[in-house]
Image (cartoon, rainbow, N blue to C red):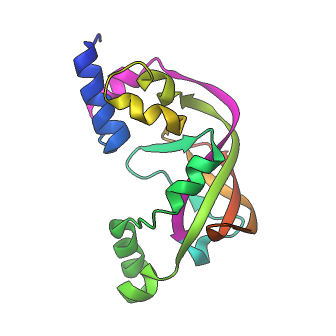
């Protein structure tokens, strides 16, 4: 399927900016996947009790977005955004209060040495007006790939304490 530049901008803005996956998103990404050998990072607040070797991190909503730049990932966890749907899911699963669950999230940066299949989203947006702002994030997108925690380190930097977590790809 072929898209005009305007259509590509709209699809990528909804996906990269808003994480909306449509049939058009899948068609646009269809031939973009390749083996990724570089180290990738993903920053996010994560439930502290789950940050341990052996924890399976399942992909949410069909795609996961990583960066080639550690500082981008570190900056993302610093925005303190916690997915409320995930908090509610844990409240139900763990039978805890919303506040106790929410307050148990800590900054985490995942690190992985490449993927069997990833799309270099930053290359897809670099020449497109409007979504080119996402180029600086050096984003690599994976779809339908879960990871498992293999190692955990507690680190400190100018932004505070965070967990640096090594993960490996888990075949589905």
In the picture, the quarter occupied by the C terminus is: top right
Q: With 153 as the anchor, is 122 left or right in this view?
A: left
141, 161: nearer the viewer: 161
Residue 11 falls in which quadrant of the image? top left
Can residue 141 be seen here? The reply is no
Residue at the spot 37% in from the left edge and 38% down from the top edge:
16
170, 15: nearer the viewer: 15
85, 108: nearer the viewer: 108
Q: With 50 as the anchor, is 12 left or right in this view?
A: left
Magenta span: 21-46
The percent position of residue 37, horizontal first and vertical second, equals 71, 30
With respect to residue 144, does 148 lie above or below? below
Q: With 118 as the anchor, is 152 left or right in this view?
A: right
Can residue 149 be seen here? The reply is yes
The percent position of residue 114, horizontal first and vertical second, equals 68, 36
Magenta-drawn stretch contains 12 = no
The percent position of residue 56, horizontal first and vertical second, equals 60, 60
With respect to residue 1, does 103 lie above or below? below
Residue at the spot 62% in from the left edge and 47% down from the top edge:
41
With respect to residue 35, does 86 lie above or below? below
Residue at the spot 43% in from the left edge and 35% down from the top edge:
134
In the picture, the quarter occupied by the N terminus is: top left
The percent position of residue 154, horizontal first and vertical second, equals 74, 70
């Amino acid at each position: 399927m072929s898209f005009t530049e305007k259509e590509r901008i709209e699809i990528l803005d909804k996906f990269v900016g808003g994480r909306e996956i449509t049939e058009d998103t899948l068609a646009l990404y269809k031939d973009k996947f390749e083996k990724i050998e570089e180290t990738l990072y993903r920053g996010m607040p994560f439930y502290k009790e789950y940050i341990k070797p052996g924890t399976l991190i399942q992909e949410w909503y069909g795609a996961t977005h990583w960066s080639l730049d550690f500082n981008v990932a570190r900056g993302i966890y610093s925005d303190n955004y916690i997915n409320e749907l995930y908090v509610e899911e844990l409240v139900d699963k763990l039978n805890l209060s919303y506040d106790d669950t929410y307050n148990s999230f800590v900054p985490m940066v995942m690190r992985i040495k490449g993927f069997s299949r990833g799309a270099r989203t930053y290359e897809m947006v670099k020449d497109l007006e409007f979504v080119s702002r996402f180029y600086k994030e050096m984003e690599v997108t994976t779809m339908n790939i879960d990871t498992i925690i293999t190692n955990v380190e507690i680190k400190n930097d100018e932004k505070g304490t965070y967990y640096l977590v090594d993960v490996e790809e888990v075949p589905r």
